Amino acid sequence: MINFRYHVVSLISVFLALAVGIILGAGPLKESIGNQLSGQVSSLRTEKEQLRTELDDARTAADRGSTALAAVAPTVLDGVLPDSQVTVVEVSPDLDDEFKAVSTQLKAAGAVVRGRIRLESAWLTESGADARKQGVDAALAAGLPLDTTASEEKQLAQALSLSLTMSTSATDHQLAAAARTTLKALADAKLITVERTPSVASTALLVLAGSADSQPAVDGTAAPTDAKALAFAQAREEELVSALHTSEPATVVAGPTGESDSLVAAVRHDGDLQVAVSTVSGISTLIGQVSVPLAIADQAQGTVGHYGFDDGATQAMPPRPDATSTDSAKG
C-alpha cells in the first residue's frame, strides 16, 4: 500500500535529482552545455544565411531570365498567329490578370481576342441541372446540330463549342444565327457570362483555368470544396475541352503550376485528351504566357505538347513553328 512515507521518499528523490542537475549544470557541465548550444545556434545562423543567399541568387537569376524573355518575346511571337480569331473560355473565376497577360502575348503573335466567356456555377455543380437542361433545349430549338444520343452535359458542351466556332460565311447564315441565339440563351440561363461577345467564328480556343478549388460560388455562398463537388466540376470541364477540340482543333488548355488536381493535370492524365489537346502550366508567369500562342500555333498543325516545369510536362516551352505552319494557322 502506498503510504505517507512513500510520498515523502518520492518527493525527496525528485528534489535531489533536481539539485544534482542544477549543481552539474552550473558547475562541471556548464561550459560544455553552453559551448554546445552556442555551436548549434552559430551553425543554424550560418545555414540560414546560406539559404538566404541561395534564394536571393535564384530570384536574381529568375528576374534576369524574365527580363531576357520579355525582350525577345515580341520577336519570337511575331507572325506566329497571323489574323487568328481567338476566344478565351474561363472555367474559374477571378482570372482577370491572367486573361490580360495572355491577351498581350496573343496580340504580339498577331491574333485577335474576339471573345471571352466564363463558366458559371450552374454549369459546374449538380444543383445546376435545370439550367443545363434549359440551355440544351434552347440550343436544339435554335437548330444547332447536337448529338442527342449523348448525355445532357455533353450536349451542353457541344452547344457552347458550336456557338463559338460556327462559320459566319454567306452559306451558313442559318447556323450562324443559331449559334448567336444559343450563346445568348446560355447566358440567359446563367450558365455562362459573356464578357466579350465573339463577333466572328473562332479559329482558336484557349481554355483558361485557375486552381482546382476555385469554383464559382453557388447562389452567393462559398464555392464547394468537397471531393464529390470537385470531381463533378472537373468532369464538366473535361467534357467541354473535348467538345471545343472537336469543333476547333486549335484548342489549348492553360492553368497554374503544380496543381495535381487541376484541369491541366486532368487533361495530361486523360488517355484521350492527352494525345489530342496541348496544355500550358505556369500561366501566371511570363514563360507560361508566351508559351500559349506558340502552343496554339503548334496545336493548329496537329502537334500536341504539354509545356511547363511540373509533372506531366513534356518540355518547358513550345518551339516557334516554321513559316509553313504559321501561314496555315491563319484564320
Image: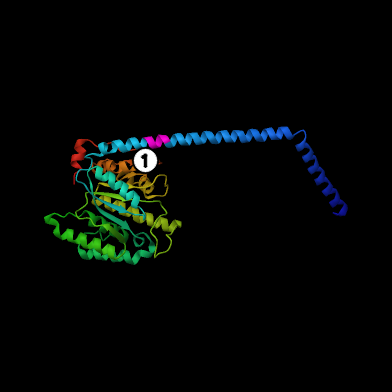
> Residue 303: horizontal and vertical position, in percent?
27, 40
Q: Quadrant of the N terminus?
A: bottom right
In the displayed structure, 193 sits above or below 59; it is: below
Q: Is 91 one of the magenta-colored residues?
A: no
Q: Is residue 239 visible?
A: yes
Task: Give percent across and percent down for residue 45.
Answer: 58, 35
Q: Position of residue 198 (x, y in %)?
A: 22, 55
**Residue 243 or residue 32, whichever sits in front:** 32
Q: Position of residue 122 (x, y in %)?
A: 35, 62
Under circle 1, the secondary element is loop
Residue found farthest to the right: 5
Q: Which residues are magenta?
A: 60-64
Based on the picture, tell me whether residue 62 belongs to the magenta stretch: yes
Main SS, magenta residues: helix
Q: Compared to 151, does 286 lie above or below?
A: above
Q: Residue at x 55, y 34 (%)?
A: 47
The residue carrying mark 1 is 308
Colouring rule applied to residues:
rainbow
Could you tell me the amino acid type at mark 1? Answer: Gly
Q: For the point 22% across and 51% down, which residue is it?
A: 202
Q: Could you tell whether 79 is left or right of 119 in the image?
A: left
Residue 149: quarter of image: bottom left
Asked if residue 318 is positioned above or below residue 4 in the image, the reply reads above
Q: Residues within 10 Å of mark 1 (few under 14, many from 20)?
A: many
Residue 144 visible at all: no
Relative side of 1 to 141, left or right: right
